[in-house]
Image (cartoon, coloured by chain):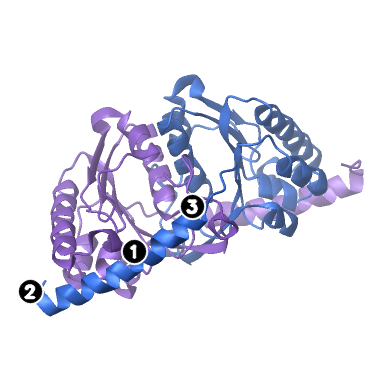
Chain colours: A blue, B purple
Amino acid sequence: MSEISPEEAARHRAKMEKRKAVQDAEVAEKTIEKGLLIVHTGPGKGKSTAAFGLALRTLGHGGRVGVVQFIKGAWDSGERAALESFGDRVAWHSMGEGFTWETQDIARDIAAATRAWEKAQELMADPSIGLLILDELNIALRYEYLPLDTLVTTLATRREGLHVVVTGRNAKPALIEAADLVTEMGLVKHHFKAGVKAQKGIEF
Amino acid sequence: MSEISPEEAARHRAKMEKRKAVQDAEVAEKTIEKGLLIVHTGPGKGKSTAAFGLALRTLGHGGRVGVVQFIKGAWDSGERAALESFGDRVAWHSMGEGFTWETQDIARDIAAATRAWEKAQELMADPSIGLLILDELNIALRYEYLPLDTLVTTLATRREGLHVVVTGRNAKPALIEAADLVTEMGLVKHHFKAGVKAQKGIEF
């Protein structure tokens, strides 16, 4: 990098002083604390991964995390093994039977989704849980395996202070409407297109 | 949910059998294994969070993870505390001095970014590291605190098998070009807009 002139340094400082004032004013305006309903959707990678990353924040502050997987079955994954090293501070429940094209059985898919939602409600009622991850719930809602209106109402009227993250593509508009924070993971470039296979540490 | 008729169940099964065949063929086509250069960019939340979630996958499989933070300073965060519970399997280096509007000193910002990049190269050379997170490197590149061409070349010619994740808004086109996997986190809805403040477990 080239040398910074005194003029350039002064210009930078003046600009950053202004920016700092704007930033401080914006922070001061925000006073509400509340449990958030968070949705990670979109075709890109990182929806479940960011939810598990958020689990680290709760765990790092000494809290407890619940995870209910609506689609994935009880297979081994790196994220599960790592989070289970936190012992009973992570309540992990893989309630799915696998992807719809693996089970090929709609009645079985519905039964699995219903059991997963019962487990989710149980964890929502547990006051020791600070963050609840409902992984791939959007898939179960998209296929209409669960009643959307009832679910959204139950999520919206959850106990105060509980953060809930719902993941999966094609989030329903009613869920987005009820949510506090919605991120759409966009696919800019994917290694599968270049013939790279699913790898340990990346996909599982 | 209403009862599934035998006809509906059969239709579902036939559709899913076809989908499974397509899926299997697609998986069979992908044969390459390689360390990936991953970029998380965009204005939405979840860029760093998804990188830390990916760290869980590597840790769950027994690997080691390096983290270099280019902007954030040595403040306490939940994700750092949680990842540090994995002991020396996580090499965490907060090399930043804080946001540009906090330091208000361009020479200091450049010096911090340069030290962070030196630490990143050191970790790239360490064969025990399976995943390296270069957190907010995009910010240092955007402000031209580091030479883009040299960085992209060094990242592209890294040792085989090493996964690198670069996070931060406004990723440079040359970095996106060199990357294997790029996700753009889009902001659909943010709780800050509704007056909710930064909270433990969500923002830090």
Q: Secondary structure at mark 3?
A: loop
Q: Amino acid at mark 3?
A: Gly
Q: Residue at x 48, y 44 (%)?
A: B199
Q: Percent from the top left, x then y, of residue A55?
A: 48, 37
Frontmost residue, A119 versus A60: A60
Mark nearer the N terminus (2 vs 1):
2
User: Which residue is the site of mark 2?
Assistant: A3
Answer with left or right where residue A197 lies relative to residue A30.
left
Do discs 3 and 1 belong to a common subunit? yes
Answer with left or right where residue A161 lies relative to residue B118.
right
The correct choice, above or below, for A162 with respect to A10 in the image is: above
Mark nearer the N terminus (3 vs 2):
2
Res A204 seen here:
no
Frontmost residue, A125 versus A168: A125
Q: Secondary structure at mark 2?
A: loop
**Which chain does the residue under circle 3 lie in?**
A
**Which chain does the residue under circle 1 lie in?**
A
Instruction: Give the crowd class for mark 3: few <14, some 14-19, many >=20 residues within 10 Å.
Output: many
Q: Residue at x 68, y 34 (%)?
A: A159
Q: Amino acid at mark 2?
A: Glu
Instruction: Give the crowd class for mark 1: few <14, some 14-19, many >=20 residues within 10 Å.
Output: some
User: Which residue is the site of mark 1?
Assistant: A20
Res. A46 mark: 3
Frontmost residue, A170 versus B16: A170
Q: Secondary structure at mark 1?
A: helix
**Which chain does the residue under circle 2 lie in?**
A
User: Which numbered disc, 3 or 1, marks the residue closer to the eye?
Assistant: 1
The correct choice, above or below, for A27 with respect to A91 in the image is: below
Is the C-beta separation of discs 2 and 1 under 8 Å?
no
